[in-house]
Amino acid sequence: MSTESSGERGSGDRSALRRLTGIDLGTFADRFWGVAPKLTRSADLSDPFDDLMTLDAVDELISERGVRAPFVRMAKDGQLLDKSQFTASGGFGAEVTDQVDSAAVLAAFAAGNTLVLQGLHRLWPPLIRFVGDLVRELGHPVQVNSYVTPAASQGFSPHYDVHDVFVVQIAGTKRWSIHSPVHVHPLNNQPWSDRRSAVEDHASNTPELDIVLEPGDVLYLPRGWIHSAQALGDTTVHLTIGVASYNDYDLAHHVLKALGDVESLRAPLPAGLDHSDPESIVPHVHRVLDAMRAALDEIDRNPDAVRRLAERVADRHDDLVRPEPVRPLASIAAMGALRGEDSIRLRPGIFARIAHTKDGVSMVLRHKTVTLPSQCADAIESLMKGSSCRLDSMPGLDPDDALVVARRLIREGIAVAVAP
């Protein structure tokens, strides 16, 4: 547990992780990632967080943005409020009935219910950008919820999360009680409710940490650490930035799926198997384990098979993480205005693999494949390195061809124009 910062004040470093922790990625990874909580006080951070969320922003989201369930929840003393108690039709032209009713939210909040705004990394522009930066630093999927708690109230009882969290205190003060895990590194299919009794018993003991977060403070908790929070004084707002960290079990899951290609492992067990006698099944367990070892050894000796498994893991990341949003109308205008002295760059967060075929060079994306002539290969390789590419100097292409390629890549959502 640490409260110190090794970051330099006023350095101008806008790293999302450094904004949260005051330290660089290497130090955070070595000392805290998945292992220990870290409390960072606002005095040890170079920037406040009022660019990400404020009390006024919460009011704007509830009253003016047409937020719909399930992007909003309300809860009191660990019990969720039925969404019909705070949602309604938006009226003429917006009759969908699961939209937030601001007056109903007011009534429920005044009655002591905590307001939870979910998926803000998809709703609120400052957090969309911040989360994109954090994903690229950590290499794991990230999401953001905001918890708005009435004075002297508790929204949720002691529990653990199956993902790591950064708690960012935005407004008011909140007392946090932190206990060590009863189940270390829980998987996403191992929720705290499966161990409710153990969690409740452990939470009744003296906490590992008993702290009060004030505006600008940040608390990092690895998955599995038990926590609960109590609002003190006025209304409190905090962000919970959740990180769904990949783990060895995720890799093993993809490896086991590959065993489905092994014919012998797909064969049926003998007819007449006596399930009332577990001892009669034990030889089959040993036989299957031997077959799995042999199949896994064969995969391990085959570089192409290992690479395919690695690509499956990368594809899973691509399924969970959205690239930086594009503005369709601005992109169309940029395509028409492109000139040789302009530059493009890879759209941040886009995931593509390059494949060379008889038809040309292909960029293989999550839902499509974009193929260009072979003479574009050097230009595509240069773009994939992440730096900006000036059109009149794209390798292997004359300026006219570079314009055509650049417009195609922007239209496909692969590249974006670089502002002058």
Image: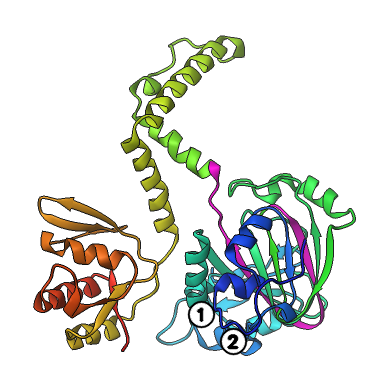
Residue 254 place in picture, x, y as percent: 44, 40
Q: Secondary structure at mark 1?
A: loop
Residue 3 as seen in the image, left or right of residue 51: right
Residue 72 visible in rendering:
no
Q: Residue at x 30, y 74 (%)?
A: 345
Residue 62 place in picture, x, y as percent: 58, 83
Does residue 283 sit above or below 2 in this rendering?
Answer: above
What amino acid is found at the position of numbered circle 1 in the picture? Answer: Trp
Q: Is residue 27 magenta?
A: no
Residue carrying label 1:
124
Of the two numbered discs 1 and 2 on the same chain, state the one appearing first in sequence. Answer: 2
Q: Residue at x 61, y 58 (%)?
A: 29
Is there a contact, CB below 8 Å, between mark 1 and mark 2? Answer: yes
Q: Residue at x 63, y 72 (%)?
A: 20
Does residue 368 sit above or below 115 in this rendering?
Answer: above
- The number of callouts visible is 2
Residue 72 place in picture, x, y as percent: 58, 72
Q: Quadrant of the C terminus?
A: bottom left
Q: Which label is found at residue 57?
A: 2
Residue 315 place in picture, x, y as percent: 38, 52
**CA gap, disc 1 to disc 2?**
9 Å
Q: Quadrant of the N terminus?
A: bottom right
Q: Is residue 241 magenta?
A: yes
What amino acid is found at the position of numbered circle 2 in the picture? Answer: Ala
The magenta stretch is: 224-248
Q: Residues within 10 Å of mark 2 (few under 14, many from 20)?
A: some
Between 230 and 389, the one lying in front of the other is 389
Between 191 and 341, the one lying in front of the other is 341
